[in-house]
Image (tube, rainbow, N blue to C red):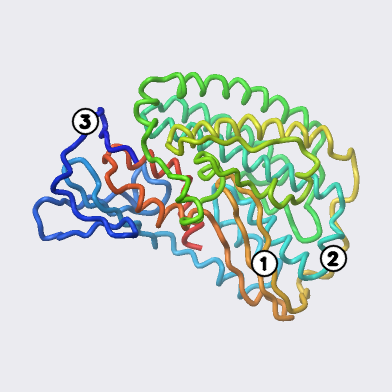
Amino acid sequence: MSNKGLFGFKPDRSNYPEIDKDGKAILDLSSQKYTKLWLGPNHPGVTGNMAVELTISGDEVVEARTHVGYLHRGFEKLIERRLFVQGFPTSIRMCVAEPDTNEYLIAQCTEELSGYADKVPEMAVWLRTLVLELARLQGLLRGVPGQAGTFSLGIGVQWGVYLRDLILDRFEELTGARVYHMYIIPGGVRGLLPAGFKKRLEENLKEIDDFIVRIHQLMFNNSVFKKRSVGVGVIPKEWIDQYGIVGTTARASGVKRDVRKDNPYLVYDQLDFDPPTATDGDIYARTFVRWQELIQTVDLIRQIMAKMPAKGDIRAKMPNVLHWRIPKGETYVRLESGRGEYGMYYVTDGSDKPRRINLRGPSYTHGIALLERMLVNANIADVHAIMVSLQVCPPEIER
């Protein structure tokens, strides 16, 4: 982390508390040297319904505690008490920002345990890949300009909201819904591409191409953005495994980790791409890696549209899902979400409902253990920027 403060001033830390081996401050809160400051759960700079309890000395943080519990979720237990097919509309709520990842995970888990994993038609596999990359794209259109917003570059956020809406238009056209799609189902997908879909999507991608240039000029050629992000919120490479850091957050610190490459699924082994990386591990590096991934995602969508079959079956013949019983077993399926490795552990006992389900999302470690460690010695003005740079999704924690 940077210790230079907001304007390059290095504060006197001679009276700062000791830090234990886990990065927690050893505080005497009765001392008048420290003040409590709460950010969230309702705050424009906080990534969703969560709160961070800060202990500050002057304008710098000496301890941070993440507080969750504002979303009344418990979706894993809800899924365990519902029929297999009824779990789909529930699972997608576990991450509002990128719900299609949960559709794929729960579909793939049920297919593997029921013996249908190899029966999904090729056309459906390509369509699943397209939907997951569109989900990544709309997430990046929030995340990249959202980082600009933490430094008061609000015009970038407005650009991103408009362009994300264009992608949501395509989702609505394809699935009938803008946010929660329930398009990927056991055995395949719900429908083919509508007539003219590829043409309209390509028109959207051309607008995004222009945005990619403009957002680069707004952020990476901006002295304010550089001053506020270079050297701030640094994640050392040795923290990656210690905290279970994944995705672009890990790649920005020099660890090339991407499930699409490390354990290919769907048709990613047929696509040409190389996940971008950086080495500095600060907010600037993480944002730049995601900007590069924005370029790459647009290219992957174009590759998928060019390579996918013109027609074909989209769904395997499945049993009556209202009376579906899956043999006893367990599996773990993972994918590369926009925030990194995202996995689901799924257990069945031969009944008509899953016995156990557990989601492994990056937000749990990024938004609690890692965030609390990173905010120590940070300036108050940098707290929101650091949090947003970790891509924390609170519903994924309160699942």
Residue 153's image quarter? top left
> Which label lies toward us, 2 or 3?
3
Q: Is residue 30 above or below residue 266?
A: below
Question: Mark 1 or 2 closer to N-term?
Answer: 1
Q: Say if mark 1 contacts mark 2, CB within 8 Å.
A: no
In depth, the one of 180 and 251 nearer the eye is: 251
Frontmost of labels 3 and 1 is 3
Q: Distance between the residues labelled 3 and 1?
A: 56 Å
Tell whether label 1 touches label 3 (CB within 8 Å): no
Name which of mark 2 and mark 3 comes first in the sequence: 3
Indicate whether 236 appears above or below 68.
above
Specify few, some or many for label 1: CA neighbours under 10 Å numbering under 14, 14-19, or 20 or more: some
Distance in Å between CA atoms under marks 1 and 2: 15 Å
In the depicted structure, whether residue 385 falls above or below residue 68: above
- Neighbourhood count class around disc 3 (C-alpha, 10 Å): few under 14, some 14–19, many 20 upward: few
- Label 1 amino acid? Gln
Query: Helix, strand or loop at disc 3?
Result: loop
Residue 267 shown left or right of residue 76 in the figure: right
Please tell me the numbered disc located at residue 294.
none
Type of the residue with mark 2: Met
Q: Mark 1 points at which residue?
A: 86
Q: Residues within 10 Å of mark 2 (few under 14, many from 20)?
A: few
Looking at the image, which residue is at 63% across and 43% down?
A: 135
Q: What element carries label 1?
A: helix
Disc assigned to residue 318: 2
Q: Which residue is drawn at 80% across and 38% down?
A: 194
Q: Which residue is identified by label 3?
A: 9
Mark 3 belongs to which amino acid?
Answer: Phe
Q: Tell me residue 320's x, y (percent).
A: 82, 70
Give coordinates of residue 187: x percent, y percent: 81, 59
**In x, y percent, where is residue 289?**
54, 34
